[in-house]
Image (cartoon, grey):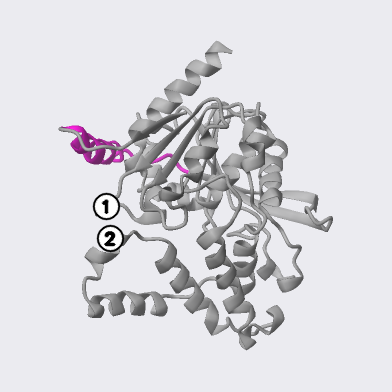
Amino acid sequence: MQHFTVRPAPGWLFALSCVPSMLFAAPLPSATEGDWVAPEFTFHTGEKLTNLKLHYLTLGDPAHPAVLYLHGTYRPGSDVLGKDFGGELFGPGQPLDASKYYIISTDGIGVGQSTKPSDGLRATFPAYNYADMVQAQYRLVTEGLGVKHLRLVIGNSMGGMQTWMWGQTWPQMMDGLVPMASQPTQMSSRNWMMRRLLVESIRQDPAWNSGNYTQQPPSLRLANALFSVGTSGGTLAYQAAAPSRALADKLVDERLNAAQTADANDFIYQWQSSADYNAAPGLGNIQAPVLAINSADDERNPTETGTLEASLKHIKDARLLLIPVSAETRGHGTTAMAKFYTRELAAFMQHTEQVRQAR
């Protein structure tokens, strides 16, 4: 396993901050959006659902090598189009240039425009987990889009965890894996405790009414704000933004007064779906090279535990990019800003191409 970090060097930081922004001057190609419907889908519980819809978007030519992006919890697949992510990766000359690659991004089960509890089934919606989401993604890619091989699978947060699962479930299907803001080890410690409390705070709210509410329960707004502040954002960034109680209160008020677009049942299912996650036992099945990218100030995946480094020893071709803490990092949210790893990702794509050609 190779382990490297982003370190300051003369001239290097200038290139990191300025080159991607210049490249972003060229606009991204237009995205194509669509829906694929599975006539029947069987969940890990044995429950079946007819007409499971998965929404997706693509960039580029379907004839080009395919890159699959997997989003974070409750985030839509359209996140790839943001300037901090797609704007640093998909433009001309950038690591995943959309004129050379076919970019695929989907809304997972329970998220965005894909089938979800709030469509009507509410709390009677089948209990889905990450394995179900990954299976649905696979069916969309292979049955819906006709893609049989992936140049790369890259995912962030929940998508990072699912990237580990993709690599061990279909080890010959991809040339490279980039799991970000994640670990392959089982859901545990503070990461799970916070998720459990998030779910319980809504379930124990009388206004939730076993999922049969007529308006969103107040606990949803509070739970969302508490979790986002407590498990993402970065210590240095928050200290800079709120060095006094008054400024801290201002940020809290902004969170609490922000427009509420989430649905409580969707929210519960989204976070509960991670409960049985554990990709560690299958790490030895991974055949594709792995570039794991985490931030040293990630609140959900603390580096001091050493669990990620230990896990990578079970993979024959794995390297870790650990982004150092700075005033610019945002804790668990750091990896949504591709400027921190464009150079390493470009080098990794070259490495995986060499491995592919040597087969």
| Label 2, residues with CA under 10 Å away: few <14, some 14-19, many ≥20 | some
Residue highlighted by disc 1: 328
Q: Give the CA separation, mark 2 to mark 1.
A: 7 Å
Horizontally, residue 350 falls left or right of residue 272, namely left
Q: Position of residue 28 (x, y in %)?
A: 39, 40
Residue at 64% in and 48% down = 278
Magenta-highlighted stretch: main secondary structure? helix
Task: Give the residue number, with chain letter if any, for mark 2.
Answer: 237
250 is higher (above) or lower (below) than 98: below
Could you say where residue 152 lies in the image, as x and y percent from the top left? 53, 32
Residue 305 falls left or right of residue 62: left
Can residue 331 be found in the magenta stretch? no
Q: Which region is colored magenta?
A: 11-30
Residue type of the residue flagged with mark 2: Ala
Count of all numbered marks drawn on residues in the image: 2
| Image coords of residue 245 (percent x, y) | 25, 79
